[in-house]
Image (tube, grey):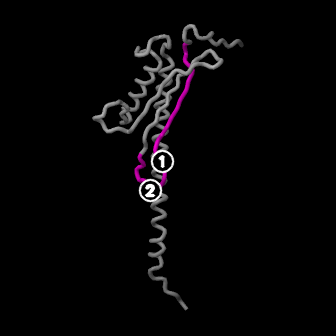
Amino acid sequence: MKRRRRGSNAIEFGLTLPVMIVAAGGVFDYGAYTYRQNTLVHAVRDAVRIGITGDPNLDEGDPLYPVDLANSRLKEVLAGMGIDCEDDSTQPSYNCAIDTRIVPADSGAFHLLQTTVSLDFDPPVGLTPVPDQVVVRYTMALTQEIEGQGEPFVCNP
């Protein structure tokens, strides 16, 4: 005896379609999050690499001061990505925060330049839970020592 299966394929499809849509949305959301995080990591790394070439003995506000060098480069790269981290209330904001500082050396001779960027993230699909903020921190040693604060590091072969 042959059973009729008319309509059962449509019912099975109707039951699995929502699961597939949520799974595809999750893949898309996490892909967008990973892409944003990856581009932000490259922007922060580039900014810190530029910043460490500055002279830490200059005053803040000088264009060659490491913090100012890193911040200006980071804002330039983020602007190229379409992200405006300026404090201009007329522009739509990503709620972007930049914190760049010189971290004193504990026992070594080199001080560190550390940049932290936090950026709000709105998932494109929004069907699955993803982090609502991308936070990236990058730290490198300054290439010049701050005068009067420790001896330069010497590596003897």
Residue positioned 44% across, 80% down in the render: 7
Type of amino acid at the residue the image marks with label 1: Gly
Q: Residues within 10 Å of mark 2 (few under 14, many from 20)?
A: some
**Vertical placement of 63 versus 133: above or below?**
above
Give the CA separation, mark 2 to mark 1: 13 Å
What percent of the width, then of the height, locates residue 118? Answer: 46, 36
Q: Nearer the viewer, mark 2 or mark 1?
A: 2
Quadrant position of residue 120? top left
User: What residue is rendered at 49% in x and 37% in y?
Assistant: 135
What stretch of residues is rendered in magenta?
A: 122-144
Task: From the top left corner, tell me how far across and down residue 29 is, in percent.
Answer: 46, 50
Comes first in the chain, label 2 or label 1 = 1
Residue hosting label 1: 31
Q: Amino acid at mark 2?
A: Leu
130 vs 20, nearest the viewer = 130
Mostly what secondary structure, the magenta segment? Answer: loop
Residue 95 at x, y = what percent?
39, 38
Q: Split into 4 quadrants, where in the image is the N terminus? A: bottom right
Residue at the extreme left of the image, as rendered: 90
Give the SS element for disc 2.
loop
What residue is pinned by disc 2?
127
Label 1 packing within 10 angstroms: few (<14), some (14-19), many (20+): few
Name the residue: 45% across, 16% down.
65
Judge left or right: residue 26 versus residue 93: right
- Image x and y of residue 75, in percent: 39, 28
